[in-house]
């Protein structure tokens, strides 16, 4: 049996021949495969599958226990550029681009009467449909509680499916306007600095780094969506408390400098911008010029912070930086405080004061899922009060409580 490194090099060699190696990552798994075959996690951006492969013979030929090892390239018809693998259902790329553009425009226009779609929301989801759970449903529910006539597109390959339709069905049955559409990066990045960067990525000339590529592409995807269509981007761990009416071309500060009172870091979890806004173009340009796949946040929160610090005060840019209380009333390192119930009389007073502050000054609350995913919502906590007020306990969009 080939050693892991030799096997991997052969595997990537065959991918290189298909001109897809840079876009794919390979991870060996434990599990049953026949004979000399090894189980491999074969993933690209928003998609993944498991196959069994081995290298045989003097010519080191790769064999995989799957009818077409590259079938996954076609799973998301909007995601990848033309492939050399023959496929009976392959369409012309222009048709694919048209499909994505038409679906987005049709969705917004079909809901344009009676003041519908006054608020155009976008989310992205790069994980499996099965992992879209109660917390994400809670966030989506809060969005529609504050914007019942708003429209939401979730840019997601996994949710643009039969299982995704079932997940969104409770919202659709209530007459709420939500859909999932597989993203087309070629269309979104066309005639922007990201176009060349994305093409180089697909050719294998960009090192994706150690941070999951899907996470970094999500940072770019949200910028492309807003630049092409305009609207509001919002993460799936954002709990909306009140209408965003009146917000225009705005981004939120995550932290401020206590000495100067000026923001010290921005965040890209919530962004409100007009179509074609020059600041969005600068964000996209910065991503393409300074991409680093080894530093968490470099292509996201730190990116928007770098750009805004440079363009602030320049003519031609019209935007607002909102204070941390707008979307990030609690920093990621202290998010646990919102999940805790009262521990003492003084703590109870603090929780009540914090709840009043959030309700008065915040449009939304970022739950910082990476830090709070495992937290339980304790009785009497700020989050529980928010859930009660949003009606989360009266529908399927709930978060487990103690």
Image: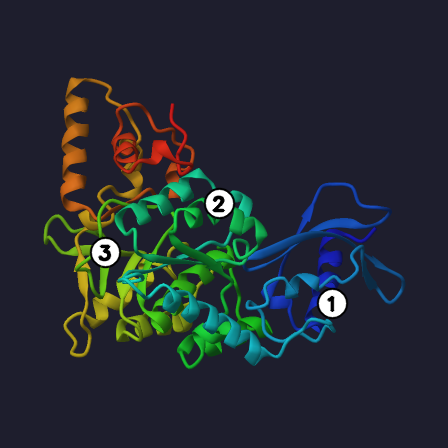
Q: CA distance from mark 2 to mark 3?
A: 25 Å
Image point (31%, 42%), residue name: 332
SS class, disc 3: strand
Question: Badge 1 local density, few (<14 within 10 Å), some, or many (20+)?
Answer: some
Specify which label sits upstream in the sequence, 3 or 1.
1
Q: In the image, which disc is placed on residue 132? A: 2
Residue 14 percent across, percent down from the top left = 74, 67
Question: Badge 3 local density, few (<14 within 10 Å), some, or many (20+)?
Answer: many
Name the front one of labels 3 and 1: 3
Residue 147 percent across, percent down from the top left = 28, 52
Instruction: Assign the C terminus to one quadrant of the image.
Output: top left
Judging depth in this view, the residue of 332 and 383 nearest the camera is 383
Q: In the image, which disc is placed on residue 14? A: 1
Q: Is residue 361 left or right of residue 204?
A: left
Answer above or below: position of 359 versus 25. Answer: above
Specify which label sits upstream in the sequence, 1 or 2.
1
Q: In the image, which disc is placed on residue 252? A: 3
Q: CA distance from mark 1 to mark 2?
A: 34 Å
Viewer can see residue 237? no
Question: Badge 2 local density, few (<14 within 10 Å), some, or many (20+)?
Answer: some
Q: Are marks 2 and 3 in contact (CB under 8 Å)?
A: no
Q: CA distance from mark 3 to mark 1?
A: 45 Å
Residue with the most extreme left position: 260
């Amino acid at each position: 049996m080939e050693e892991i490194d030799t096997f991997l090099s052969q595997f990537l060699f065959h991918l290189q021949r298909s001109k897809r190696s840079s876009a794919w990552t390979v991870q060996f798994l434990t599990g049953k495969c026949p004979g000399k075959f090894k189980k491999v996690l074969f993933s690209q951006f928003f998609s993944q599958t498991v196959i069994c492969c081995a290298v045989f013979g003097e010519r080191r030929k790769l064999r995989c226990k799957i009818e077409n090892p590259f079938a996954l390239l076609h799973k998301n018809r909007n995601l990848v550029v033309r492939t050399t693998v023959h496929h009976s259902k392959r369409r012309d790329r222009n048709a694919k681009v048209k499909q994505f553009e038409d679906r987005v425009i049709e969705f917004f226009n079909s809901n344009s009467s009676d003041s519908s779609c006054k608020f155009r929301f976008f989310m992205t989801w790069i994980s499996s449909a099965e992992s879209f759970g109660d917390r994400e449903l809670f966030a989506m529910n809060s969005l529609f509680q504050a914007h019942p006539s708003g429209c939401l597109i979730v840019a997601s390959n996994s949710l643009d499916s039969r299982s995704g339709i079932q997940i969104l069905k409770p919202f659709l049955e209530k007459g709420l306007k939500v859909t999932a559409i597989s993203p087309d990066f070629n269309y979104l990045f066309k005639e922007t600095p990201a176009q060349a960067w994305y093409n180089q990525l697909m050719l294998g000339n960009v090192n994706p780094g150690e941070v999951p590529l899907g996470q970094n592409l999500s940072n770019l995807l949200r910028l492309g969506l807003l630049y092409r269509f305009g609207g509001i981007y919002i993460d799936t761990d954002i709990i909306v408390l009140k209408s965003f009416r009146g917000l225009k071309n705005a981004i939120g500060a995550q932290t401020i400098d206590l000495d100067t009172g000026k923001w010290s870091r921005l965040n890209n979890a919530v962004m409100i911008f007009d179509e074609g806004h020059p600041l969005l173009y600068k964000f996209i340009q910065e991503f393409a010029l300074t991409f680093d796949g080894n530093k968490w946040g470099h292509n996201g929160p730190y990116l928007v912070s770098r750009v805004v610090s440079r363009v602030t005060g320049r003519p031609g840019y019209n935007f607002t930086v909102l204070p941390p209380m707008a979307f990030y009333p609690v920093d990621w390192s202290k998010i646990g405080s919102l999940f805790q119930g009262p521990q003492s009389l003084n703590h109870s007073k603090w929780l009540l004061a914090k709840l009043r502050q959030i309700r008065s000054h915040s449009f939304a609350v970022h739950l910082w899922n990476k830090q709070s995913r495992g937290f339980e919502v304790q009785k009497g906590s700020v989050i529980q009060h928010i859930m009660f007020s949003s009606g989360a306990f009266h529908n399927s969009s709930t978060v487990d409580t103690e």
